[in-house]
Each structure stands twice: as C-alpha cells, then as structure tokens.
Image (cartoon, rainbow, N blue to C red):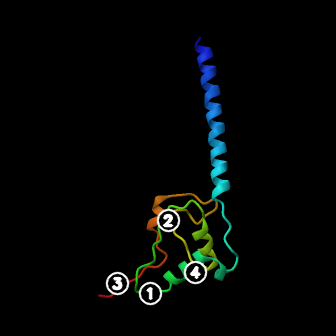
Amino acid sequence: MDILILDKTQKKVAELEGHRTSLFSLIIEKCTLKGPKEKNDFPHATFLDKITQRKVTFPRVKVFTLNYDTLFEQAANLIQSVVLDGFSFLSPREFSGRQFDFDIVQRERVE
C-alpha cells in the first residue's frame, strides 16, 4: 500500500513539474518582445532619452515597472544607458536585491 501511494505521489509530482515547465515556456514566449532597432521608432527609448536628460546635480532617474517584458532594458541599451534592474553585470546574470543599491557615480553634495 505504501509503495502504491509513493508511486502515485511521484507521478503527480512529475505531472506538476511538466505543467510548471509548460507554463514557464508559455510566459517566456508571450512576454518576449523585440523592440524596434531604431531609436526614433521605439517609444520606450524616446521616453528614457527624455527623462535621463537632466542636470547632473539632480538624482538619478528611477523607473519602476511591473512589466515582464524587457522593452525598457532594450531601449536603455539602444540609447546607451545603464540599467540597474537588480541583476548582476556578469554573465550569467543573476538577480540580487543588493544590486538596487549599486550606484555608478559617487556625487559629492555641495551645501
């Protein structure tokens, strides 16, 4: 009896793993968008370009989005801006919340 229950449990786990893999593949497929190659054709790039043109004394721009797509990252790459999105700059990129505290420029405060 115990062997039968264990066998059914293993089959159920394998079935759930299969569903999980299918769902991840579907999410990746549906959320993988390719942005335009030209900056002028890419609204995300135009938006980022406008909000990043500021006085150097102003704090860095922070954009928060719940989107799963990488359109902002693609746009930032197109306009040659650095994105601090919580992922390391090394390959393979790994997420770490500590990356949000990373700052490229150390600015002295003049008071």
Kind of residue sitting beneath label 1: Val
Say which residue label 2 marks. Answer: 65
Q: Earlier in the sequence, mark 2 or mark 4?
A: 4
Say which residue label 1 marks. Answer: 56
Residue 19 location, quadrant:
top right
Give the side of residue 51 with respect to residue 77, left or right: left
- Residue 54, given in percent of the width and then of the height, sits at 46, 86
Kind of residue sitting beneath label 4: Thr
User: Which structural element holds mark 1?
Assistant: loop
Kind of residue sitting beneath label 3: Arg
Callouts 1 and 4 close, C-beta under 8 Å = no
Q: Earlier in the sequence, mark 1 or mark 4?
A: 4
- Number of the label disc, if any, that sits on residue 109: 3
User: Which structural element holds mark 3?
Assistant: loop
- Residue 66, given in percent of the width and then of the height, sits at 50, 61
Tell me which residue sits at (68%, 67%) in the image: 34
Residue 90 location, quadrant:
bottom right
Real-space CA distance between mark 1 and mark 4, rounded to the nearest whole angstrom:
20 Å
Q: Earlier in the sequence, mark 4 or mark 3?
A: 4
Tell me which residue sits at (66%, 64%) in the image: 33
Q: Earlier in the sequence, mark 3 or mark 2?
A: 2
Kind of residue sitting beneath label 2: Thr
